[in-house]
Image (cartoon, helix red, strand yellow):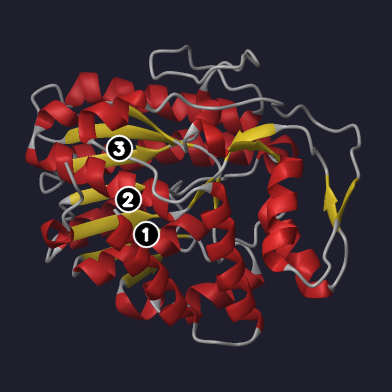
Amino acid sequence: MKLNPDFYKGKKVLVTGHTGFKGMWLCKMLTMFGAQVNGYALESPTAEGGKVFVESGVEAGINSIIGDIRDREKLLQVFAEVQPEIVLHLAAQPLVIESYKEPVLTYETNVMGTVNVLECVRQTESVQSFLNVTTDKVYENKEWPWGYRENEPLDGYDPYSNSKSCSELVTHSYKKSFFADGRCAISTARAGNVIGGGDFSVNRIVPDCIRAAFAGQDIEVRNPYSTRPYQHVLEPLYAYLLIAQAQYEDGKYVGWYNVGPDECDCVTTGELTDIFCHQWGEGITWKNVSVEGPHEANFLKLDCSKIKSHLGWQPRWHIEDALRETVVWAKAYQKGENIANVMEKQIREFLRRA
């Protein structure tokens, strides 16, 4: 299968977490496809992120609703008003280190927030396709050298990863308990680490690289030897839209899907930073500032055979391409160029290759 932009033309789509990094790019794609896009999320968590969200043009092109997914009553009102056909659930507390600081908030948002969204789906007859976006960190990490498959045990270690494992289980239960008749197609997507323009999250390596580059400082790398499956943000977003389209058209495509890069793009944080420094230029360098901190996985990658065989999805941009496009975006932002145009150009180029 291939993603068909015309499929989304005129479709009523609800995106939770639309003010976040991935949500912003997803809404940009959907508006370019001609969908009727509705977003439900908190304000952007960082001042820089809020600025980018406005400058991206996303806010002006959609029905943007500020709200908390923990507020089920308000969420139900939004579902009743919007009557969405497709729901893409991205809203979350997405940071591992933050989850150690705020474990209750993390579980309330990532577990009960998912319950609330699914309960709204259950009570809204218009919804025909639902996708819960989780993470590659849902698996019980045994630090082994091969990729995790969708049938591996779910048991994230830290509160963030574990809450996302719980979110998966909640989705599985709702699917079996309330949607066995096929009224609404339900899937989850477990994506590896994503990078791209517009991410200003704290304690993430590429945003840290960009902040250091903007300031003309050395990049401080916390875990240079940890291996992660890095991919440009457009890779999983293409997959999310493909899954939502495929299961809308044929229920046989429902399931749990890993979405990650090829093995050659599973690199250490140090290697990633080396590539970033090369792409950025200007003599930028990095230094190892490893310190003892909360547990984080050292080695993690995914086996993405299922989505490749079932839906024909393939990664399009290698790690060098992904970082090049991220640097292009960041330098354009630094110079005050039109970010909306940069995003649209990158989306069109990515779709051309797809």
Q: Quadrant of residue 310?
A: top left
Element type where label 2 sits in the image: helix
In three-dimensional space, the C-alpha distance between marks 1 and 3, rounded to whole angstroms, equals: 20 Å
The kind of residue on which mark 1 rests is: Leu
Please state the horizontal and vertical placement of residue 301, each as a whole percent of the image.
55, 27
How far apart are the alpha carbons under marks 2 and 3?
23 Å
Which amino acid does the dot numbered 2 rest on?
Tyr
Q: Which residue is mark 1?
A: 26
Give the residue at x 24% y 25%: 175
Residue under label 2 = 238
Q: Residue 54: x, y in percent?
A: 48, 79
Above or below, 85 against 200 in this view is above
Residue at 53% x, 66% y: name it. 43
Residue 235 in the image: above or below residue 173: below
How far apart in space, not on screen, are marks 2 and 1 (Cα)? 9 Å
Assign the N terminus to one quadrant of the image. Answer: top left
How dense is the environment of label 3, judged by Cα within 10 Å: few (below 14), some, or many (20 and up)? Answer: many
How many numbered discs, if any?
A: 3
Query: Residue 254 location, x and y as percent?
Result: 21, 29
Tell me if 203 is positioned left or right of 36 in this view.
Answer: right
Nearer to the camera, 334 or 156: 334
Q: Amino acid at mark 3?
A: Leu
Residue holding disc 3: 118
Rendered view: 264 above or below 343: above
